[in-house]
Amino acid sequence: MTRLTPAFMQGSLERLSGHRNEPERVAAILADAKSRYAVFSGDKLLVHAGPAGSDGIWWHDRADLPNAISGVEPVLLGLDADGVAHFAMQAADPELQLGAGQAAVDLRSIALQGLVDDGMLGVAAQARALLHWHVRHRFCSNCGATTVAGEAGYKRVCGACSAEHFPRTDPVVIIAVVRGSSMLLGRSGRFSPTMYSTLAGFVEPGETAEDAARREVEEESGIKVGAVRYVMSQPWPFPANLMIGMIGEGLSEAIDIDPDELADARWFSFDEVRAMCDGRHPEELEIPPSISIAHHLILAALDGR
């Protein structure tokens, strides 16, 4: 399916960020029989059989929660328009035995196949990122003692030194570089041989997003970038990134790729890129699918947006 916006950008729950430090209220919501739960087994979401795009395929009532998640700390995601609370839980056993009509599906496949309504994909990203953080922060980075969840799952507290730890989101810059009527696209060794995309990389400490974009492009391709403008951002829950999308002006033409980062990089004419978008490139080259911010940055650069 083709999307008009990247996936994972819409979250349709009220997050209750101002009430997570009210333990009595959180406990009452958790005890409510109407509350619903998303369950992850490893990094995959446990879904029921059902029609694509149906919110019901991935929410569980407390009565039908698998036994394997007993004792696992739930994370509050928020309330829907009817006031029903939604939580996320991680299966204690990564080899969770699935019931009849159930499957464990990764979020990338869920987005590509349209299994979950767009309005809830952002909630799935929220759940995935938070649970990933909890699984990997059971111990205090200050003293090494065991931590426990607090504020409905939005922090962990050390029982020994009282240090507080909070979920992190790692910023990643991703940029479509344009020079005249040409666009710089590269192919990672992880991509299929026909896939070309915008260049990307992590923001380093003490660095602006704009400078990070310039640095990453020059390091990976040898191309210098001048003016940079922000276009959009996308939560990318693999595991907890925020993609900061930009369009930049290429100041040089000679490409010198870093083979540790890219298998190839080229300047493509806008006509070639349009052919890649439409599936009519003579070499059968293509751009990333419409769930990704890269896809929409490429379209925005072509349109001058």
Image: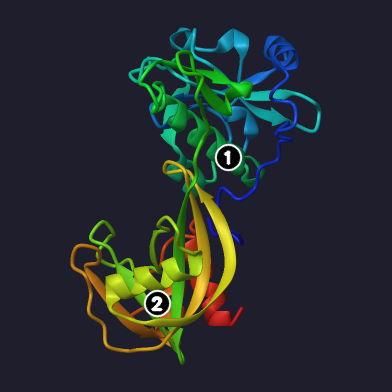
Occupied quadrant, residue 116: top right
Which mark, residue 280? 2
Viewer-side residue, 9 vs 21: 21
Q: Position of residue 145 (x, y in %)?
A: 38, 16
Q: Earlier in the sequence, mark 1 or mark 2?
A: 1
Which mark, residue 116? 1
**Any part of residue 186 in sight:** yes
Asked if 170 appears above or below 184 in the picture, the reply is: above
Q: Position of residue 121 (x, y in %)?
A: 58, 42
* Render colour scheme: rainbow
Q: Position of residue 207 (x, y in %)?
A: 45, 62
Nearer the observer: mark 1 or 2; the answer is 1
Question: Left or right: 245 with respect to 17?
Answer: left
Residue that sits furthest to the right in the current view: 82
**Any part of residue 285 in sight:** no
Viewer-side residue, 90 vs 225: 225
Question: Left or right: 130 with respect to 191?
Answer: right
- Element under disc 1: loop
Please report the residue visible at 36 percent of the width from the left and 82 percent of the height from the top.
224
